[in-house]
């Protein structure tokens, strides 16, 4: 007697909170990489400078920081060349903010695709995350090139442990993905929330140690940096490339950041999985 065949597809009247089917994601890996390529082409295909913007954008930002925060305001960089100090901060910030903002627009930007064909919805935020990790790697090469230039010209010696930068990079990407997954559900229902998020990201830059060091924060404002889980990530990232005097953080602060990152990521994934199938009715 023939054994009953297993169902390839199963439709249920409810959706689980945690439904991360790794086997299904692996099966759709070709789609994942195609989406990364599509998003890359959409960003740079019809531009004058193309992928050069990956390098030009942080360079222009750093030059603006040097003019405002170093030349005009005179904010201390702990005897570190301002270009290196600001470049380390903006490199990690670009990764976090890009992953967050692109993930936030998952449903709004892909409604036409979601309504026509089935595939694991998590593929979309993962593809945007991979795209921005790729952009981050290019910008990290720029940072390394500037470090080598300053070293061989005798302006600033090589120091720190570059491998230690992997931890804040991974945590910043996970944090951006987790928060982005949560807000992707909200922006699908409330479109004007995107305007508030753009404003919130600009304000968040001023409470993250991007153009200043935590050691330079006045004591009456230090509590802001202590409750910000991103702060020790920027300090550790800067210390990894520029030496221990470039960043101030403790093991407890890193543990706090790791705990918040895991909670945010798991919570965002759970909410995304629960609402992904029903949101297409309101997008």
Image (tube, grey):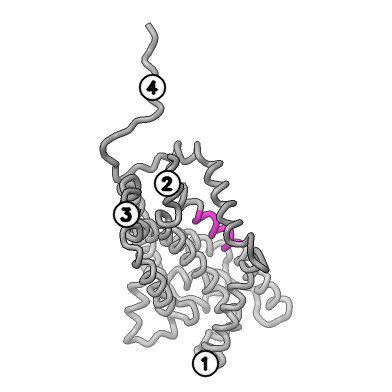
Disc 3 crowd, CA 10 A, few/some/many (<14, 14-19, 20+): some
Q: Quadrant of the C terminus?
A: bottom left
Q: Which residue is identified by label 4?
A: 6
What number of labels is visible? 4
Query: Closer to the N terminus: mark 3 or mark 2?
Result: 2
Residue ID at (44%, 49%):
112
Quick one: 261 or 239, which is closer to the camera?
261
Residue nearest the observer in this picture, 29 or 188? 188
Query: How far apart are the two marked residues, 4 and 3, measured between alpha carbons?
Result: 32 Å
Marks 4/1: CA distance?
69 Å
Q: x%, y% of residue 193?
A: 34, 67
Q: Earlier in the sequence, mark 3 or mark 1?
A: 1
The image quadrant of residue 83 is bottom right
Q: Which residue is mark 1?
A: 74
Residue at position x 50%, y 39% from top? Answer: 28
Q: Estimate the spatial distance between the alpha carbons at disc 4 and disc 2, rounded to whole Å.
A: 26 Å
- The tag on residue 267 is 3
- Image height of 224 relative to 263, above or below: below
Name the quadrant containing residue 62: bottom right
Among the two numbered marks 1 and 2 on one chain, the one whose residue lies closer to the N terminus: 1
Whether residue 133 is in magenta: the answer is: yes
Q: Mark 4–mark 1 contact, CB under 8 Å?
A: no
Q: Helix, strand or loop at disc 2?
A: helix
Residue at the spot of label 2? 114
Q: Helix, strand, or loop for circle 4?
A: loop
- Residue 78 seen in the current view: yes
């Amino acid at each position: 007697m023939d054994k009953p065949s297993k169902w390839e597809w199963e439709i249920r009247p409810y959706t689980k909170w945690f439904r991360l089917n790794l086997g299904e994601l692996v099966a759709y890996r070709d789609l994942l990489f195609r989406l990364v390529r599509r998003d890359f082409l959409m960003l740079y295909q019809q531009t004058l400078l193309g992928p050069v913007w990956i390098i030009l954008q942080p360079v222009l930002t750093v030059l603006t920081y040097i003019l405002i925060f170093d030349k005009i305001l005179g904010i201390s960089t702990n005897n570190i060349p301002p270009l290196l100090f600001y470049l380390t901060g903006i490199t990690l910030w670009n990764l976090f903010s890009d992953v967050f903002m692109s993930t936030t627009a998952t449903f709004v930007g892909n409604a036409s695709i979601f309504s026509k064909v089935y595939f694991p919805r998590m593929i979309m935020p993962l593809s945007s995350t991979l795209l921005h990790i790729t952009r981050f790697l290019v910008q990290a090469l720029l940072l390394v090139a500037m470090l080598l230039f300053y070293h061989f010209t005798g302006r600033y010696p090589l120091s720190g442990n570059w491998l230690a930068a992997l931890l804040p990079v991974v945590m910043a990407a996970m944090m951006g993905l987790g928060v982005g997954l949560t807000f992707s559900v909200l922006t699908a229902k409330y479109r004007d929330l995107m305007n508030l998020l753009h404003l919130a990201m600009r304000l968040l830059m001023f409470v993250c140690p991007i153009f200043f060091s935590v050691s330079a924060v006045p004591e009456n404002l230090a509590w802001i940096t202590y409750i910000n889980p991103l702060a020790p990530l920027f300090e550790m990232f800067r210390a990894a490339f520029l030496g221990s005097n470039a960043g101030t953080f403790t093991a407890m602060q890193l543990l706090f950041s790791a705990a918040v990152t895991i909670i945010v990521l798991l919570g965002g994934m759970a909410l995304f999985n629960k609402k992904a199938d029903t949101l297409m009715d309101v997008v």
